[in-house]
Amino acid sequence: MPLDAATLAQLVPGFTGRLLQPADAEYHEARRVHNGLVDKRPAIIARCRGVADVCDAVKLARSLKLEVSVRGGGHNVAGLAVVDDGVMIDLAPMQGIHVDPRARLARAQGGVHWAEFNRETQLHGLATTGGVIGSTGIAGLTLGGGLGWLMPKYGLALDNLRSAEMVMADGSVCRASADENPELFWAIRGGGGNFGIAASFEYALHSVGPVIAGGLVAHPLAKATEVFKFFREQCASAPDELMLLAGLLHAPDGAGAKIVAIVAAHCGSLSEGEKALQPFKAFGPPIMDMMGPISYCAQNALFDAALPKGALNYWKSQFLTGLSDEAIGVLVERFAACESPMSQIFVEHFHGAASRVPVSATAFAMRLSGFNVGIVSQWMDPRENDACIGWCRETFGELKPFFATARYLNYLDHDEAGDPLSAAYGPNYSRLRELKAKYDPENFFHTNVNIRPA
């Protein structure tokens, strides 16, 4: 039952943002998330302007006995940022960013996207590990891991997190860092949104850019097996400064041609980076060569156009035991059978600093070298739902013989079979359940990849 504006105002008298209900003009745009397949309708959308608003939104949900979801960037493929008939606590208006170039620190609020964050830090030639899609929010990406072009050299986004301002399940505020609430700080670095709402983040920055050596080369699908084997060879000797990714994609000109691409980013000196890219430019040779000097911001936006907001998405992902010839054969064969010109398969190389952190150091447990495969089924016409979802599931099934147990939390879709949490957290799972019981014993924050209290 919708509440009248006066009643809402009495429940949260100091709220400075907007409290939207279904009859409000802004409601339908505010409830939409990146994945157009998600169509949920909250009872109230609390668009917060600051931390006090976030606290009030938590208390409002409690007083009305409604479920809660938290929206940062809204990029999560499972649509966990929005909840039916509950309160969506929307951090999107919280866009503040402050960079301290002398201390090499940046503080950003929970509604910031990586494109905005990078734009501010790159003014000073500084960066931290952030996602490979500019429209991804810093909040969800960091709390669930934080892959990015800098992770072999500087670790994941969560490895660069120095503190977070947290709104807890009772509406109180605390700071999580190595010195304050260290157990909570351990848990939020990989534990997702299970322990509270991260209203702001403080990151360590590194000297990167504004121009790096990066970009991509592409080959026709007929050469995909050769390209993947070459990719595997290059990964085996890649230095920490070099992040590599291989993808089975459709050509960006819209003609629908299927291609295989290698994407690289080198965060060392430009001369060293250009030297490191030479083997990729020479192999083949490629039919498309976009490797060379590129701004760090442009590198992070390479795939933005290929993943538009509102497209229908269904994903599956898991770590591979290795990129064997047999696994390569399945990847190529399954992409050849893909009918949607928007779908893709990517293979991310994990190595370097992100893989050397001890598993017990943070909640994030995927600290290993190797390859993570992501199957991104994407389309626009709802009449193609069954076919596109079916292709993704079939591809995932064909790859099962090559899967390791490790899984990346941020890529999990809404219908995962088995026990994905055990796979994602491994030996850290029991400790996370104990900390969930300490910080959120009622499981108030459960519209997420949920860790149940012990």
Image: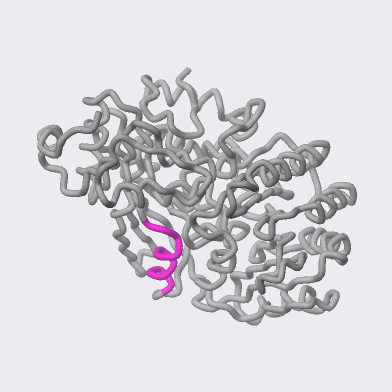
User: Which residue lies at the image location 46% right of the left edge and 39% below the top edge?
Assistant: 80
Q: Main secondary structure of the magenta part?
A: helix
- In this orientation, does residue 70 appear? yes
Rendered view: 443 above or below 328: above
User: Which residue lies at the image location 35% right of the left edge and 69% below the top edge?
Assistant: 102
Nearer-the-camera pick, 387 or 239: 387
x%, y% of residue 430? Answer: 54, 23
User: Which residue lies at the image location 42% right of the left edge and 38% below the top edge?
Assistant: 40
Rendered view: 68 above or below 344: above
Is 119 magenta? The answer is yes
Nearer-the-camera pick, 355 or 142: 142
Rendered view: 276 above or below 396: below
Q: Quadrant of the N terminus?
A: top left
x%, y% of residue 393? Answer: 71, 39
- In this orientation, does residue 179 appear? no
Rendered view: 439 above or below 377: above
Apparent side of residue 140 relative to residue 6 in the rendered image (left or right):
right
Nearer-the-camera pick, 8 or 96: 8
Nearer-the-camera pick, 422 or 434: 422
Is 379 magenta? The answer is no
Which residue reaches farthest front? 383
User: Which residue lies at the image location 82% right of the left edge and 79% below the top edge?
Assistant: 282
* Magenta stretch, residue numbers: 112-122
